[in-house]
Amino acid sequence: MSITAPRPGTVTTAIPARLDRLPWSRWHWTIVIGLGTVWILDGLEVTVVGNIASRLSEPGSGLAISSSQVTGLAAALYVAGACSGALFWGRLTDRFGRKKLFMITLAVYLGATALTAVSFNSWWFFLFRFLTGFGIGGEYAAINSAIDELIPAQFRGRVDLIINGSFWVGAVGGALLSIIALNTAILPKDVGWRLTFALGVVLGLVILLVRRHVPESPRWLLIHGREQEAEQVVSGIEQRIEEERGERLPEPEGTITIHQRESIGFGIIARTVFHDYRRRSVLGFSLFIGQAFLYNAITFGFGAILTKFFDVPADHTGYYFAVIAIGNFMGPLLLGKLFDTVGRRVMISSTYLISGVLLFGTAWLFGQGSLSAGTLTACWCAVLFFASAGASSAYLTVSEVFPMETRAMSIAFFYAIGTAAGGISGPILFADLTGTGKVADTVLAFQIGAAVMCAAGLVAALLAVRAERRSLEDIARPLTAATTTRGAQATP
């Protein structure tokens, strides 16, 4: 038995060590597909909405709405929903469990998306854009918590990066799908955009079916006094993997003693994150703000730059965006393993600094008039190849460097900061700069994004936690932990 009970309310267990020593298996792929693929849907929907803005504003679209309302008010409401949803659902995820919440948040997301597809008035469209964001904000907290607690330590970095980077797979699909949706020779004006939302709902329902088979986090069950359920979950996983491999698993190394509690007060969570782990909070804040500024420096002016400076037809910008999105996904895909081998501090700081320096170079070349639409897109691909890996590592960082009891709320808080920074400062600063049609203003936008990204890279070089291949309990001791035999504990 891996579980003993020295006294009521206290449990000594090897379950975290048992999870971390598991080899990669088909069961882990089920986790990745069931939990991670929702970002593909998010990328598809966000891209589609941006690309079909002009169609929605046309007579005959079925909505009385302007293009600026779609990219302005509707986008702001989506951001507001995501921020508030992350904080609302994040607290519930830490309190009521990962599985219960990642089923509910996906249902909210899918329901709101389906109702967006049948919008008959602008207020209806705005309402359900907010509720769609409300659902996706909760997904970030619930999903990243569950993934980190179920994936073995030696694979956690690359899996997190690839899953968060899969947003850009959806962005590629959204860019290409919007080309079809905007083609009135294929679909009527009032049908095409509705079908894109409906397609997302169908794909989401498939994910929901797979997600039913994903178990509750055994780590969460342990802390909340449900150790027998945790034992059953882990024993079932071990049995499946042993049958798949045809051999016994190695013995786990180390145990941890937990003083079980049904809930942790918000005051304790806030004090832990912002006082006991304040250096890590500065790190998380810096990483999220840095990537938000770099991405907004490029994406808010993407279409305007191509059309105003290079005469690219508005209905062709989707092809360029698809190329950029591919570059975004290739970064986490190809660099992800290095975060587990070379290490977090080196890779996080270098991806931030390299992407910032490359954007400075792009700004200089653009200012010199040395770029065409194709070469500018190539420069953006190079910048975002590294920036995407860095941005994904921001989610990885805040999901693994804080104690178990605060994990979902920490993810939610830093996600809300990054999303708000992008959604509030982006339209105010970058859209105005890149929309003037002046080369100097666009150069300035690039330089601002690059400078903030480089600053975040320097913070990571100083403060990033060496979390590679380490158990979550070693990186940040659980608040309910009494003793452990698992090696050195991380300091705040």
Image (cartoon, rainbow, N blue to C red):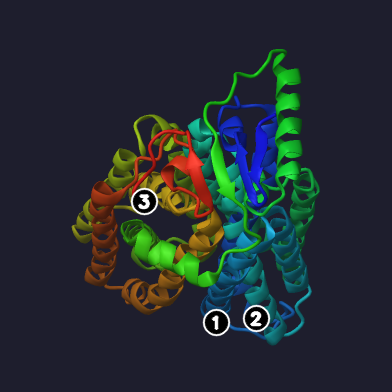
The amino acid beneath tag 3 is Trp
The amino acid beneath tag 1 is Leu
Q: Is residue 325 above or below residue 92?
A: above
Instruction: Name the residue tied to disc 3.
Output: 380
Instruction: Name the residue tied to disc 1.
Output: 73
Q: Is residue 441 left or right of residue 411?
A: left
Q: Earlier in the sequence, mark 2 or mark 1?
A: 1
Q: Quadrant of the N terminus?
A: top right
Q: Is residue 301 left or right of residue 75?
A: left
Q: Residue at x 27, y 45 (%)?
A: 354
Q: Is residue 484 above or below residue 194?
A: above
Q: Which mark is residue 126?
A: 2
Q: Position of residue 258 (x, y in %)?
A: 57, 47
Tell me which corner region of the image, top left, top right, bottom left or bottom right, holds residue 121.
bottom right
Q: Look at the image and tell me whether residue 173 can be seen.
A: no
Binning the other alpha carbons within 10 Å of mark 1 as few (below 14), some (14 to 19) or many (20 upward) gives some
Measure how far apart labels 3 and 2 are at the Cα level: 31 Å
Measure how far apart labels 1 and 3 are at the Cα level: 27 Å
Tell me which corner region of the image, top left, top right, bottom left or bottom right, holds residue 77.
bottom right
Q: Tell us which disc is closer to us: 3 or 2.
A: 2
Q: Residues at badges 2 and 1 in contact (C-beta under 8 Å)? A: yes
Q: Earlier in the sequence, mark 3 or mark 2?
A: 2
Q: Earlier in the sequence, mark 1 or mark 3?
A: 1
Q: Which sits in the foreground, 418 or 479?
A: 479
Q: Position of residue 299 (x, y in %)?
A: 42, 62
In the displayed image of the protein, which residue is found farthest to the front?
7
